[in-house]
Image: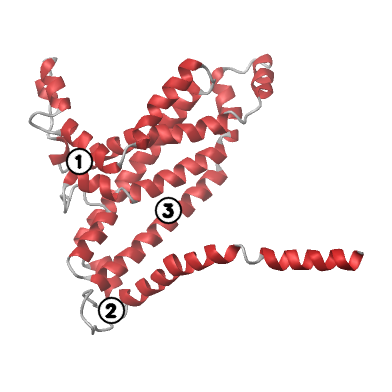
Amino acid sequence: MSSTRSARKARTARALWIFPVPALVLYLFLFAYPTLQAVQYALTDWDGYSATFNNVGLGNFTRIATDDDLFLNAAENNLKLTVTVVLAQTALALGLALYLVRTTRTTTLLRALFFLPTILSSVSVAFIWRFVYDADGGLLNSALRAVGLDSMQSIYLGDPDKAILWLALTQVWFHAGQMMVVFVAGLQTIPRELYEAAEIDGAGRWARFRHITWPLVAPATGIVVAYTTVQSFKAFDLVLGLGGNPPSPALDILSTRVYTTFSNNQFGYAAAQSLVFMALIALLTWLQRRALRRT
């Protein structure tokens, strides 16, 4: 009897190895193989359609680091966008979650309203805010004129110094409600007894937040920060919808820069840019995780 049971367990264990195979095949076919091909093309000057090409070694990467002002400008814009969105969106989402953490009819309705922009497509959001930012008949300038604040009108996305900040505002409006839901879920796992004990000990609202809420909501914060970082680097369709194709240098980010390079039939160079792009995301996410762990 025991030998039969052992044999059955062995067959079951072997069968369990079959289940990861489809996912592994998809991963190898859709990610690992294209990544290896990108590494191969990054070392060439392939134009995307010719049957022959030249190996240039690390020449593409040297060009990115020393002789590509457009790529460096896009990287600078992307870092500004990421830092602004991560700080603003995390703070806003956490503030909304703290206000709406208790489940009532009112808070449920407000959560739904704040989450609503997330279900819209990026292109829809881009065209909505393009109308809002329009310098001639846009919503913001029209509202400012209506209340007599003509001096505060702006060209918004046409301002090379502030265009990336207006893009960040759009991104925060788009995804803050989504991140709020993550924080609400994290806050609802904190035992209420901790707050009651802190109140009995005389801890104020700020002390309760600092010593109870913030440490225990750290896992949710890690998710929000990492996801927001990736969103900021992948705001491709949002940028094209707001700034056109190709976008102005003030709105150009790494994803649109790589796309433009591909469009110009510089596949080898675009592959090198893509690898640098991926490495930057990985490095920044790793640094954020280390910082959050220390905090």
Tell me if mark 1 has few (under 14), some (14-19) or many (20+) residues whose alpha carbon lies within 10 angstroms of its own: many
Q: Quadrant of residue 246?
A: bottom left
Position of residue 135 in the picture relative to residue 294 (left or right): left
Q: Residue 149 carries which label?
A: none
Which amino acid does the dot numbered 1 rest on? Ala
Task: Answer whether residue 165 is visible to the viewer in this image.
Answer: no
| Quadrant in the picture for the N terminus | bottom right
Q: Earlier along the polypeptide chain: callout 1 or callout 3?
A: 1
Q: Give x and y (percent) for residue 241.
A: 21, 44
| Residue under the point 14% across and 24% down | 152
Marks 2/3: CA distance?
27 Å
Which callout, 2 or 3, points to the residue nearer the camera? 2
Task: Pick the residue in front: 126 or 58.
Answer: 126
Which callout, 2 or 1, points to the residue nearer the camera? 2
Say above or below: 212 vs 62. Answer: above
Say above or below: 180 vs 231. Answer: above
Say above or below: 55 vs 185. Answer: below
The secondary element bearing badge 3 is classed as helix
The residue that label 3 is drawn on is 284
